[in-house]
Amino acid sequence: MSLLSIRDLHATVGGNEILKGINLEIGPGEIHAVMGPNGSGKSTLSYVLAGREGYEVTRGTIAFKGKDLIDLAADERANEGVFLAFQYPVEVPGVVGMTFLREAYNAKLRYLGKQEIDAMEFLKFVRSRAKTLNMSDDMLKRAVNVGFSGGEKKRNEILQMAVLEPDLAILDETDSGLDIDALKLVSDGVNELRSENRSMLIITHYQRLLNYIQPDHVHVLAHGKIQRSGGKELALELEAKGYAEFSEEAA
Amino acid sequence: MALQPVAKLPFEGLIADARSHKLGKWHSKLSERALEQYAEIGWPGPKTESWKYTSLNKIASGTFSLAGEYSAIVPEDMIMPLTCPRLVLVNGVLNKELSNLEQLIGNLSITSLVDIEDHQKMFFDDLFKSEESKGDLPLTYLNTAILSDAVMLEITEGSKCELPLHIISIGSGNGITFAPRLIVNVGIGAKVDFIESHVGCSDSAYFSNSVTQLYLGDNSEVGHYKLQNDSRDSSHISLTRAVIDDGASYDNFTMSVGAKLSRNEVRAHLKGSGVECCINGAYLGAADQHIDNTTFIEHQAEGSSSREVFKGVLDDTARGVFQGKILVHPEAQKTDGYQMNRAMLLSDKAEIDSKPELEIYADDVRCSHGATVGELEDELIFYLCARGIDRESARRMLIGAYISDAIDEVKNIDIRSSIQSVAENWLKQNLYEK
């Protein structure tokens, strides 16, 4: 059975239809990449999956672990195991990184009907995860993302993912704005989190990130629909030829 | 041409009543003089510049009587949550049974005007006179004219008060007015923290016109923290005035959450050089609350610094006012002044009026000010929700963080966390998703 099953998904933003019939099946442990030109609906797809307000599903279904996601609020989806790593992580003034992680972690435990975690135990757990991503204690003591560099923000996203241990991670343009060293660090962090129980949906414009995080399947999204699907060789083909052939179909 | 009848001053009738009250002849004279000064300035109207954004019409046209009852039950859930010695005023009069001052003896002397003979009161004359000679503050004169008590705190030279003193001013009764008056004299090199909690008994609706005056001796260190949590149908108008000598440090914070109409006016006169002065505050308003924070910082001598951070959150049709003036005299070279006012509006109908003002006559100074108004961004809420935190908690967390940024300015750590918990309670009780 698929972990995520998207069927004939249509969605509008501000009255404009952006997604026009998406079909996508992601099995447990699989890594899928969705590539496409700017304005193709890639980020919309990630927001629709995460449940952002203002992104309205007008037709179709999204089943996650057999449950209908559409009726769940964003926080419920997160607690069910959907994680969105933001293209532009938001600065959260006044909320300390460690507190934020603990609130999120405990929210999930409460959702699952479990006891909240002991603060000291949690601190140790987070530190061990932060170490892999080369994140200092100081970064955890600061307000979330406030004054962080682009690379630090992206690493912080991956740290949150490592702590919350989702079943499905959606990485929205995680490579944007990263230099080669930061890209490698982030990719290593993501690869560390690969497991047979964790699926990933990598949304990217460029093939570059896929050199570091190797996908099982690649899809081309254009004009609100998946136009082509294939293996990782499809990404290389796109890198060579660009998205030109998909823009012609617009007419 | 017919002469216009002379409009009667608000509260004029009550002033006569107050004279036959408990403070005797001495107060009669003081009151007469205060009435004259009050009459000269008149009641602040819409044309009075410093009251442009806050209308006192409702108070002026209301019917008030003087309080006659001076005992009450302390509303423990309204005051600042702190375990320390207490001084309790009910309707402006010291209530010794409710106070608990045993642990303070030695450091601090407390005198209530009610307790002393007329000839001893003469000693305090100057304190009232010197206060009245400064500026046109009609409500301060009104306070002097109708007060039923005044409490003097004297912190002797060099003494360090280990525990803070919690002054609780309780309003109890409907349609009454009262005038709490505190006079704090901090000796050279002394150190003290005190808190004012202004609260009301449930369902009381009153007008509290409060005045606190402080004198900070050379190199003294004073923390002065105020919670305005008066009954929701009441009015709270207050003046805090601090005169600060060489090398002293004054840390002032006002947390305003109560009353229907409130004005917290803080005036700091930095007489000495090398003074460190912080006038900070936070305000939380919902429903039809009106909260005014007006500050005036006067740099009179060289090399002093002042810092001002105010943050507010306003919901429903609540209205906030911030007026902050910094005046730097020609002698006050090397002044360092900073002022910031930020407000977050949670509804389309909430409003903030912000008026910063710098008046600088010295050339070698560093002064800056700024003001911002914003809303809680959807993007921010979504970010927290996407991490599993529900919308309501996310809102509360973000607004709490916004306000705590100002509360973090409070230097005393215990009092800081008490103020935090007041803010958290307010958020729990007042913020619902609409």
Image (cartoon, coloured by chain):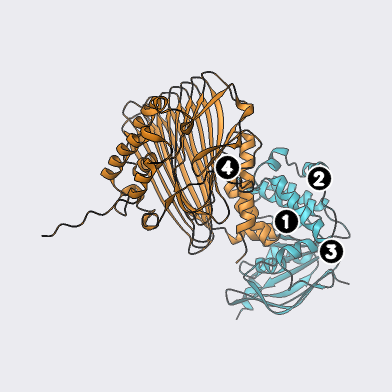
Chain colours: A cyan, B orange
Q: Nearer the viewer, mark 3 or mark 1?
A: 3
Q: Secondary structure at mark 2?
A: helix
Q: Quadrant of residue B99?
A: top right
Name the residue at 72% across, 62% down: A75
Name the residue at 86% across, 62% down: A29
Disc 3 from disc 1: Cα separation: 16 Å
Q: Quadrant of residue A62?
A: bottom right
Which amino acid type is marked by label 4?
Ile
Which amino acid type is marked by label 3?
Glu
| Residue highlighted by disc 2 | A122
Label 2 environment density (alpha carbons within 10 Å; few <14, some 14–19, many ≥20): some
| Residue highlighted by disc 3 | A30
Are labels 3 and 2 assigned to the same chain? Answer: yes
Per the rendering, the mark at residue B407 is 4
Res A90 seen here: no
- For the residue pair B423 and A250, the one nearer the viewer reads as B423
Q: Nearer the viewer, mark 2 or mark 4?
A: 4
**Residue that lies at the very extreme toward the top in this rendered image:** B158
Label 1 environment density (alpha carbons within 10 Å; few <14, some 14–19, many ≥20): many
Where residue B181 sits: x, y (%)?
Answer: 45, 37
Which amino acid type is marked by label 2?
Phe
Residue B322 appears left or right of A249:
left
- For the residue pair A89 and A196, the one nearer the viewer reads as A89
Q: Chain of mark 1?
A: A
Which amino acid type is marked by label 1?
Leu
Disc 3 from disc 2: Cα separation: 29 Å
| Residue highlighted by disc 1 | A209
Mark 3 or mark 1: name the one nearer the start of the chain: 3
Are labels 3 and 1 assigned to the same chain? Answer: yes
Mark 1 or mark 2: name the one nearer the start of the chain: 2
Q: Chain of mark 4?
A: B
Residue B17 appears left or right of A190:
left
